[in-house]
Amino acid sequence: MIRRNAHASCVVLGSKGVMIRGRSGAGKTTLALALIEACRGRGQFARLVADDQIWLEARNGRVVAVAPDAIAGLVEIVGVGPSPVAFEAGSVVDLIVDLVEPAEAARYQDEAACSLEGVQIRYLNVPERQVVCAVGAVLSRLDIFPLG
């Protein structure tokens, strides 16, 4: 099985895996932790898979994100450094979220998909460093509504 390293974070929200991509400093870790907190606050399962680096594997028509051994169970907290956190060793990727410059983020987005490891996966882009907006968009796209 071929693994490819990706500069991304990944979380499991309920039964869905979310891969978060973006440049360094775009807020991947911040969004990952905010999504976990939002789901846990609604009584749903949520865990980190990996922070900032993941292994990607194509398996049976799906893409699986796997935590690299060296950083499994660690999340980098700005000003603190790597900190231990509960994690899942891997997850199927059901949604790809790209953190983009605010001017590049579409205000309204129809359902979209992109190819990852030759597999079509649901896709969403959100403005980087705008966590409240991003959490609402991601949870809505996954039918985990942020309001109500």
Image (tube, rainbow, N blue to C red):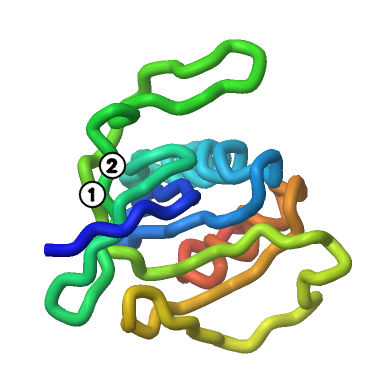
Q: Residue furthest right?
A: 103
Secondary structure beneath disc 2? Answer: loop
Distance from disc 1 to disc 2, alpha carbons, whole Å, reads: 6 Å
Above or below 113: residue 3: above
Residue closest to the eye, 62 or 142: 62
- Residue 108 is situated, as x and y percent measured from the top left of the image, at 75, 80
Q: Earlier in the sequence, mark 1 or mark 2?
A: 2
The quadrant where residue 125 appears: bottom right
Looking at the rendered image, the disc whose residue lies closer to the viewer, 1 or 2, is 2
Q: Indicate left or right for 77 with 55 as reference.
A: right
Q: Indicate left or right for 133 with 92 as reference.
A: right
Q: Indicate left or right for 137 with 103 as reference.
A: left
Look at the numbered discs 1 and 2 and tell me whether their residues touch, using CB distance below 8 Å.
yes
Residue closest to the eye, 98 or 33: 98
Secondary structure beneath disc 1? Answer: strand
Q: Amino acid at mark 1?
A: Gly
Above or below 68: residue 98: below
Q: Residue at x 34, y 29 (%)?
A: 71
- Residue 91 is situated, as x and y percent measured from the top left of the image, at 26, 55
Q: Amino acid at mark 2?
A: Ala
Q: Which residue is mark 2?
A: 67
Query: Which label sits on residue 114?
Result: none
Residue closest to the eye, 62 or 141: 62
- Categorize mark 2 by other alpha carbons within 10 Å: few (<14), some (14-19), many (20+): many
The quadrant where residue 60 appears: bottom left
Q: Which residue is mark 1?
A: 90
- Residue 67 is situated, as x and y percent measured from the top left of the image, at 28, 42
